[in-house]
Image (tube, rainbow, N blue to C red):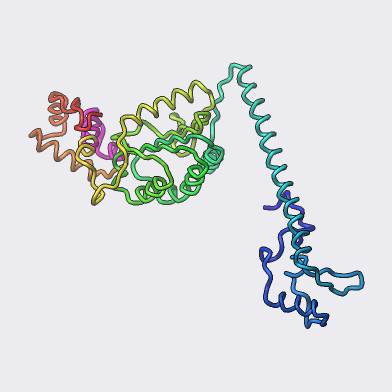
Amino acid sequence: MCMDTDTSDAGATTGAGGGEICTDGLRHYADLLRGWDPDGDCPPCLLDLGLVRRLPDGSLAPVPPRLAADARVDRLERAIEEKRNALEAVRTSISRAQEVYLESYDRTDAHPVRTVRGPGTITATVAAAVQACQDELLTAQPGGGRPQRTLDEALPSDLAALGRGVRQRTIYEHTVRSHQPTLAYVEQISRAGGEVRTLDEVFDRLIICDRRIAFVPDPGAERSQVALAIEHPGVVRYLAGIFDHAWQRAAPLRDDPAGRLPAELTDDVRRTILRHMVNGHTDEAIAARLGMSPRSVSNHMRWAAELFGSRSRAQLAYLIARSGFLDERSSTGR
């Protein structure tokens, strides 16, 4: 995009080929310096670099490299200064608009909660907020492993944020520890300084940028179609507090051999599955909620049935509820 670029002097400012001189250009330049009449047209690189100047009569005159460099550097420095001034003007304008935006909410009873509709609009809105993030990015991602395409789209902006010095903390569910695409993404994020932990079950999807704006799904609509962008300071603080509490209970994500969960995390997942079963959820509903396969849920159910000696799902739920098994704390003490 070059909406704010003056293309009338593009060659003089940027130079063809990034300011590099070609072999033909060097040969042509040497012939001019010797007073010879070079064969062929003057290579564009000589004109772009200012090493050759066209005279009023149409002839070409060589220019000493130092003089050509001084002229070119002056133009580049002026162009850079203009860009810096334009950038500062944009920052100032946005800052002033933000003050007016916040003041408008302070003077009214309206709550700064916006509805964002459509997957494309949601993605663009969240991406803009992440790109503007300067200090801290908090993310909670339920539902197990994320699709490869989603991870590929998120990685560049997340790495860019970490490169700006943004502290990034992410909570997943324990089940991502066996999802290789998510683990590959986490490995790159962790190398760049991001922190990742997992829980038996994440409360819901949540993104908080600089504790100034939060994004959550609209609970009254289809998850991928409608999101809420929240800028009410009190609500954002509340959501950040929920995240911090979950972060303290979560386990750091480290490389596990063969992609297996450590025993204490397996116990956490198993208790979560059985808790949902006792509450009346089907294997399919539990699997969707925890981001795992129905077969894995069934395996945990089979383990529990053998442990408690039950012959039916209803009996298993009764025995588990009466045993106090779901009230036990894992060996981690969390």
**The furthest residue to the right:** 57
168 lies left or right of 212: left
- Where, by quadrant of the figure, is residue 71 drawn? bottom right
- On screen, 137 above or below 70? above
Give the x, y percent position of residue 251. Answer: 30, 36
Q: Looking at the picture, how far across and down is residue 167, in whole percent?
A: 46, 37
Q: Is residue 289 magenta?
A: yes
Q: Quadrant of residue 93?
A: top right
Indicate whether 111 appears above or below 177: above
Q: Closest to the observer: 193 or 317?
A: 193
Q: Which residues are magenta?
A: 269-290
Res. 14 image quadrant: bottom right
Magenta stretch holds residue 295: no
Decide whether the magenta segment is chiefly helix, strand or loop: helix
Residue drawn where x is 65% and y is 26% of the image: 99
Q: Is residue 203 found left or right of 318 in the rendered image?
A: right
Taking depth in this image into account, of 279 and 141 the one nearest to the observer is: 141
Q: Quadrant of the C terminus?
A: top left
Above or below 276: residue 153: below
Horizontal relation, residue 136 to residue 13: left or right: left
